[in-house]
Image: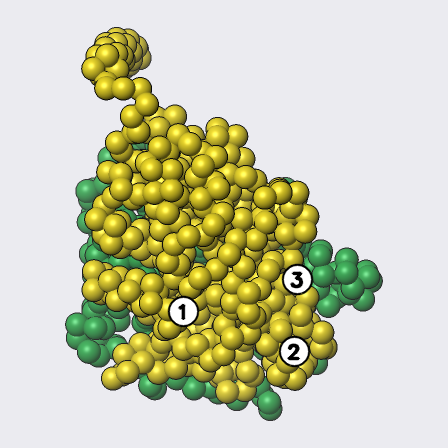
Amino acid sequence: MDTGSGTLIDSAQDSLEENFMMRKTFFAVAIAAAFAASPAMAQQKLKIGFITTLSGPAGIIGKHMKDSVEVALDQLNRKVGGLETEVIYGDDQFKPDVGLQVAEEMMKKNGVDIMSGIIWSNVMMAVQPAVNKAGVIMVGTNAGASPLAGAGCNELYFSTSWNNDQTPEAMGKFMQESGVTDVYLMAPNYQAGKDMVAGFKRYYKGRIVDEVFTRVGQPDYQAELSQLRAKNPKNVFVFYPGGMGVAFMKQWSEGGFRGQFPLYSVFTVDETTIPALKHAVLGQYETKFWSPDLKVPASQKFVADFQKKNGYLPAFYGAQSYDGIMLIDSAVRAVKGNVKDTKGMVLAMRKANYNSIRGKFTFNVNHHPIQNFYLLKAVAGAGGKDPVMEIQKTVFENHKDSYYKDCKMKW
Amino acid sequence: MPLTLVLEQLLNGVQFGVMLFLMAAGLTLVFGIMNLVNLAHGSLYMMGAYLTVAAVQWSGNYLAGVALGLFATLLLGMLVEVVALRTLYDRDHLDQVLATFGLILFFNELVAILWGRTALDLARPDWLQGHIELFAGSRYPLYRAVVIGVGLAVAAALWYVVTRTRLGMLVRAGASNRSMIAALGVNIRLLYTFVFGIGAALAGLAGVMAGPIYAVQPGMGELILIQVFVVIVIGGIGSIRGAFAGALIVGVVDTLGRAFLKPLLGTVLSPAAADAAGPALASMLIYLLMAAVLALRPEGLFPSRGGQ
């Protein structure tokens, strides 16, 4: 009883205080409005909401992205598009509902002008409709959900990454052209896993020994590896992002599979997982649109500044996020700081008029980059350091995704 | 399918079961004896792995590092019990779930602050590298064979302690009727702290052994915790014997399901249907098993005698 009535009184007090606070803010706003100069004057401060995953096993990806955004802000002297900038970071906890909640809060409470970030396709599919419906531009910096590249494309949605299918398409093309046959496919059993396999098969036309889908987040692959060995394929293609990749690669190397079966992967070996895997990745092939060793001036500057500030090598997750901020910068400059001119910013973004880490590129009609994809190989790092990814060759030049024809946007 | 493959998969199942057992033994002891729902058991597993990584790096010797890491996890477990959990014994299970969930968040952030968010590498020493040939043509990783050996040894030692020693007698008595043994003059608080410490060390041992094959990363404990709860429900809450049986059953069923369900379904269904149903059904299998056990024997397969 005691605690019950106590809570009641507390909450009554809370709401009184809240009321008072609200009135105070209202007066503050009213006074500020009264003193504001001409209404035509552009706004002085830019607020960007950046959503990523900052907790749990995937938090490492969010860290790469956040650190890269900070590098971009440093290079712009903390002024995106010449405006005083505040970036508000939100943690989606790898959950679509939480991501949506964070986005709503950023737009309603913080009043952000532009949204960016997001690692996971399923989170993006929950967040993007709400953001765009509110008339706010969304610059996705990783998630590559196919609907958003196709029928679900949106004027206010831009991507500085890729469509999910493109990276495995590059691997499929490379393996097809290299005459690699008898491939065994493995991926986690969820949408992205299925997309990766579908993308791979769009360009690889040889024999497939088996397709194995494992449980999402599964830590142990010994049972599947025993099956694989029994099937004795000539080559193996896998997609195991994040912590799943660390576990898979460790067990691959522990079981003596390295050297026995050539392994090709996408989104499995990168700068977020190499520190945990070390020599277990040596010789591994990946395809990507970017690598820290890409010979593009903007990219080299980004990598150098990033390493100087953070003391480690950035992954592509970071490069895309840096690129997102630079794209926003170009758009805000084009509208001379008037970020309420959403239409003007969209028109400016479509030009991709900035120094991208991938080099000069153009946006496709669906606001996804038309870009190159490269074959990468894990080689020993200089002086006994961790292995590094090295670009071997260009697999695709100016590659368009497979969905843009379904996008009805005209510009 | 060839017999050797089935044997190898059985072995994989036993190895997975042994890992689950180490986790489940501690959890079931704590639940059965102290009547405490400890969601943070996975965090102790994670801390075991992290503390061992730190100790191996510091001492430069694998075995010394493992011993040090396990001892540190034991102390950490006792500390957590004294500082955080002691106040929870008289509360209901919901309060315990909330408080220990808080501990999960605390430990996950703690390791992220201390060691960073990148997964760490806990390398095996050279003498644990390589493979053994169990039967012609099979290459079974030596490390996993050692994991099976260690797990079975720990199970035997636990069985001995619980059934043949005075400490074990107190533990069993505590599980049956704690107010009675407190009335008989046994320091139940100290016993609880000690039992919790042992449970933590067992979880830590599972974490140490998982280190070289899984990813040592923040939140690694939650990936395995759910399966451990399934083990306890199947085996019977509070029973070490039940935890052992449950762990082996879950390990073997899950492994064999993952390996053979799809090919088996392929013999009766179309390949496309088998492709879709196989993985989905395989990941459901242990939960179906749990539901069946709950329906037929709600107390689990080996309920602890005496009950609450």
Pointer 2 or 3: first along the chain: 2
**Residue wearing tag 3:** A198
Neighbor class of circle 2 (other Cα within 10 Å; few <14, some 14-19, many 20+) is: some
What is the x, y in percent for residue B211?
36, 68
Q: Position of residue B140 (x, y in %)?
A: 51, 82
Distance between the Cα atoms at labels 1 and 2? Answer: 22 Å
Frontmost of labels 2 and 3 is 2
Location of residue A230 by image quarter: bottom right
Is the residue under label 1 in contact with that under label 3 (CB below 8 Å)? Answer: no
Q: Residues within 10 Å of mark 1 (few under 14, many from 20)?
A: many
> Compared with residue A182, is residue A220 higher up or lower down, i.e. above or below?
above
* Chain assignment, label 3: A
**Position of residue A43 in the picture relative to residue B305 (left or right):** left
> Which element carries disc 1, helix, strand or loop?
loop
Q: Colour of chain B?
A: green
The amino acid marked with disc number 3 is Ala
Same chain for the residues under marks 1 and 2 in the image: yes
State left or right for residue A143 relative to residue B184: right
Residue kind at label 2, given as amino acid type: Gln
**Image coords of residue A67 (percent x, y):** 28, 54
Asked whether, in this view, residue B259 is left or right of residue B106, the answer is right
Q: Which residue is mark 1?
A: A291
Q: How is the image coloured?
A: by chain
Among the two numbered marks 3 and 1 on one chain, the one whose residue lies closer to the N terminus: 3
* Chain identity of mark 2: A
Residue where numbered disc 2 is placed = A176
Spatial distance from mark 2 to mark 3, Cα to Cα? 15 Å
